[in-house]
Amino acid sequence: MLREKMRNVFTFHLALASIVALWVYLVANRDVGDPDIWWHLRNAEYLFKNLRLPQVDMYSYTALGHPWINHQWLAEVAYYLAWRAAGLVGIYVLFLLLLESILLGTFYLAYKGSGNLKGSFLVSCFAVLLAAVSFGPRTLLFGYLYLLILLLILQRFRSTGQGPLWILPPLFCLWINSHGSWMSGMMVFGIIAAAGLLEGSWGRVEAVRWSPRQLRQLLMAGAASVAALFVNPYGYRLVLYPFDFILRQKLNVGHVEEWASVNFHEPRGKIVLILLAALLLGAVLGRCRWRLEELGLALLAVYFGLTHMRFLFQAAILLAPLLARMLDFLPPYRREIDKPLLNSVVFGGALLIMTFRFPTEAQLAATAAQRFPVDAMTYVKAHGLPGRIFNLYMWGGYLTWRCPEVKTFIDSRADIFEYIGVFQDYLDAVGLKDSYRVLDRYQIRYVLMPPKDPLVYLLKHNPGWKVVYSDNVTTILERAGPTRAETSASPVAATPGRP
């Protein structure tokens, strides 16, 4: 009898988890078209061929030779090995496994933190909608996986007084070599640790002080984790990179879409509005008490999520346990009315749908061809582009991967191009602020942009430019005559990284 009851509980949990997994799978939508993945693959290929990391830019003519830190090299290795194993399908499998692990782990985190299975299920399904902002083959997913592991360890340590804190230093060592989001992990660790320094109750907020032994263990784990950050190929420079991002990369933050604030007029903004309403109603009308660390994590999640929609994925993870506890009015799971056969059908149905909808290499390539100049590369390889090109920011990595012999103007490694002023020149050109000056300054002979881009419209109506290739995704224009520098009597000085 006991074994049968446990089997019923297991099948119900498995059914709910399979629905969450299917929901993640459907929202992921067979997309491997993240603009960064291509130069990530090129970096990892360079590492495997030369057994060293790139220290300078090698892909563009505008930043060629300038120092550059590859702060995501370890995650790039994973994607490259997946590509070597199975091409685009391998990349898809890896990022899908990461997504499923993170969001199913969020389901588990919410359940362990609330004891509310049905509430955790609903919160996890809602979290998928928030997390969709970062769906794709991104190195950032490794950061969110590490964040989830950190939260699970600290949650267990907080609730039981015991936990494998020894995992934290190697976790942060992996984290800093995989992605710059390790700083979010340090902030989360700091909030949870600091909340245990207080004891008391303030309205619905309560705090429980760490025991001397727990505090000592936390301090030792924190100090070891900070030391582990310096175990990387770039030393202190990699540790300082997030601060460099905050202080120096203003154009990156100001003009890259994922760093924008939440727009409440868009569908994603409506989802965030539902989240804010749930938090407000839960705080005012709900019965659950807030632990001080939950309040701190909620403030962190809401602030960063509203300020930069990129962090909505992080907000979904941090807020899941609290939101699940707010749904404690839902009827609890009742084992006596469970239907294990129905649970098994749900699990099997989800598995069948994911199996039959699994994409082929050709389908993934077709999806990528809708966003990147796939067909145009056939023209480039056949005819070559004997001169400097001006390319779309989001396409630079793809050009680097498909045509390494062609040096790009810019790619989505925004940092290096902002440091030397190229990013600003790019924005001036595509914004029609000073397009001709930029094209002349860099001696551009070819422009490779989407057909409906304003710069394409401008140049198509200039007799000095002509269209040499065009399809639904890409238009290539060529300068009809020599550049101004080529007709000038005085030669242009060749400064590394700048024309």
Image: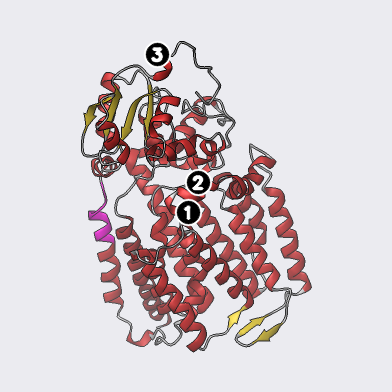
User: Residue 122 bears which disc, if any?
Assistant: none
Q: Which residue is mark 2?
A: 252
Label 2 with label 3: CB-CB less than 8 Å: no
Residue 61 lies, in percent from the top left, at: 47, 25
Label 1 with label 2: CB-CB less than 8 Å: yes
Relative vertical location of residue 470 with respect to residue 125 in this rendering, above or below: above
Q: Earlier in the sequence, mark 1 or mark 3?
A: 1
Magenta includes 276? no
> In the image, which residues are magenta?
351-359
Q: Nearer the viewer, mark 2 or mark 3?
A: 3
For mark 3, does the 10 Å Cα neighbourhood hold few (<14), some (14 to 19), or many (20 or more) residues? few
Residue 405 lies, in percent from the top left, at: 40, 22
* 161 with respect to 377 (left or right): right
For mark 1, does the 10 Å Cα neighbourhood hold few (<14), some (14 to 19), or many (20 or more) residues? some
Q: Inspect the image, locate mark 1, and give the three-letter code of the amino acid beneath it.
A: Trp
**Local secondary structure at mark 2:** helix
User: Residue 487 bears which disc, if any?
Assistant: 3
Q: Which residue is mark 1?
A: 259
Quadrant the N terminus occupies: bottom left
Residue 476 lies, in percent from the top left, at: 28, 29
Q: Nearer the viewer, mark 1 or mark 3?
A: 3
